Amino acid sequence: MFKYLLRRLILSIPVLIAITIIIFLLIELAPGDIVDYYMSSEGQMTQEAVEQLRARFGLDQPLPVRYLNWLGKVLQGDLGFRFVDGRPVGPLILQRLNATALLIGSALIIGILIGVPLGVFTALRQYSFWDFTFTGLSFLGISMPAFIAGIFGLYIFAIQLRWFPSGGMRPVDRTPTFFDSLYYLILPASILSLQYIAQYMRYTRFSMLEVLRSDYVTTARAKGLPERRIIWRHIVRNAILPVVTVIGFSIPGLVVGAVFTETIFSWPGMGTLYLDAVQGRDVPLLMGMNLVIAVAVLLANLATDLAYAVVDPRIRYD
Amino acid sequence: MTNVTIDRTSATLAEDMTDLRRLHRSADSPLRRTLRRFARHRLAILAIVVLAVIALAAIFAPAVERYPYEQMDLRARASAPSPEHWFGTDRIGRDIWSRTIHGGRISLAVGLMATAISATVGLTIGAFSGYYRGWVEMILMRFTDVVMTFPSIVIMLTLAAMLPRSVWSIVLIIGLLSWPKFARLVHGQFLALREQEYVLAARTLGIPNLRIIFVHILPNVLAPLVALVTFSVGEAILIEAGLSFLGLGVPPPAPSWGNMLEAARNLEILQDFPWMWIPPAVMTVLTILCVNFIGDGLRDAIDPRLVL
């Protein structure tokens, strides 16, 4: 098990390097850089001043040198400084990462806690009224992208009903208590989770129906085992396996959804920061964020594999 | 005597032929079976009708619109829905109804074109890696894995900000980043199909590999692809809407559902002028809903056991 983990971790290093090179090339090959951004905002500048400015940002060096410089710094734990205001990138990302992790984590938990039981519930009552209702709603759920759900959610629950604040992460006039934070978190997290509730429900239901038809369930019934035991030990336990993988695969999607949810609810997370960085051509910040996101996604994939091994003891990683 | 026999024979022959034809007509061809299974999905059929209406409105937008979509009615800025402007007007007095159907034109076109690109790329990569195996497969599938591992929206956002803003940039960005799922599916299919006897026969006959791939094997992969293509169109429409919503997609003044929704990022518009963002929001969800119903129906009809 440990060996497997180690091998996976080592294998993901070239993937990470490939990703950072691709992103670096994408950013650098596009016409225009941060100096053009300054120039357009400050009018005329002499050629000399422009060159000086380029040299200050290290933009006068050739591409590979710049990439290797960046990589060398990263290995020492230094993500560099923002172009825009010269603040260090690392702490900024860390701070925003916390906000995003809170949002994504809550959405994931809501999605699992509501979606999976709903899937079990509807599968056990296939073709009943509740099955049709929830399956129908789940179609709406998977067809509603995070930003449209966000717009409707904000309009209905924050503006019309005034149940929740219309944005931000904490009240501005006092230090937030736990309940304050919860109050600000509930609406964006539930909105983000909608699509995943629907998705997890659909997969769980499908997987349950598949298992319900299998021979060992018939055998368990024939043995006269109590129904409750058959459902929980024999059906749900097996039906949950593929769902674990689906949950893992949905994490990159959650990151995407978070970008939109954060934009709509002015949540101070990675998504809003990324948009700032993209629009300002802030190379160090963009590179740092892409690295962090890539690491997070690779770790999530690894965690999915591990979770799979925990739920399914038949799987051995050697 | 002989004449009679001949007549008799020809009559039987003709009868036989009609019998044969009748038999053939009632025969359960795979296509017909699939169509019949699809027709059982009432919701999918309904979805096709609704989507057809949306598509027709989009195609004939110039005939359906009531004002040119970029025309500003300065006396009726930000006006609520009325007989003159069915869906109201936006802040500079452009007719929302006209913009919504024109937006559908761009959104649907982007979805279709982007999917055409991603399906072609994915199909080619999947076909080559599945057919040739060996190092070709190694490289192509590792590459596919890398593209798949990364949340492609991040690259899309970066690209969208770097490239000049145009409909074509959006089509390219979406098309060139959403092919891995096609590559995966086609790769898997080719792995199984390349071992079939007819492929061996074709090889023995000395038919060139490219011809075997595209003429002999490819048609057998198309059925499972149909559902994936459907879902993919929906996904591309969503990505376009998302990018445009963030102000990185289809550039104004051309309307797309996404860039009309961008207005809703302004709290004042969100609160006081709901008619400016509700039509594109509803149209997007409705379109995706239809696409998902159709895709689901197709998937069940083609292979009831296939899961996505």
Image (cartoon, rainbow, N blue to C red):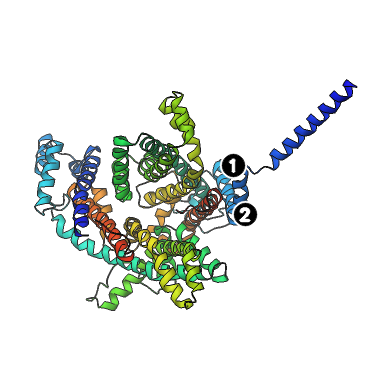
Indicate the amino acid at tag 2: Arg
Left or right relative to A172: residue B32: right
Residue B271 position (above or below residue B98):
below
Q: Is residue B24 above or below residue B84?
A: above
Q: Residue furthest top?
A: B2
Q: Is residue B242 above or below residue A241?
A: above
> Residue A154, can we see it?
no
Q: Amino acid at mark 1?
A: Ala
Q: Characterize the local packing of mark 1: few (<14), some (14-19) or many (20 or more) Cα atoms within 10 angstroms.
A: few
- Provide residue B46's location: percent of width, then percent of height: 60, 54
Residue appearing at x 23%, y 48% in the figure: A280
Q: Which residue is mark 2?
A: B40
Can residue A92 be seen here? The reply is yes
Q: Quadrant of the N terminus of chain A?
A: bottom left
Between B216 and B233, the one lying in front of the other is B216
Of the numbered discs in the image, which one, if any, rests on residue B293?
none
Q: Does residue A21 appear to the left or right of B58 in the view shown? A: left
Q: Position of residue A301 (x, y in %)?
A: 28, 56
Q: Chain of mark 2?
A: B
Q: What residue is drawn where x is 19% and y is 58%? A: A93
Instruction: Point out residue B21 in the picture as x, y percentages from the top left corner.
Output: 72, 36
| Mark sitting on residue B63 | 1
Q: Earlier in the sequence, mark 2 or mark 1?
A: 2
Closer to the camera in the image, B84 or B61: B61
Vertical placement of residue B193 versus A255, above or below: above
Same subunit under labels 2 and 1?
yes
Tally of numbered tags: 2
Q: Chain of mark 1?
A: B
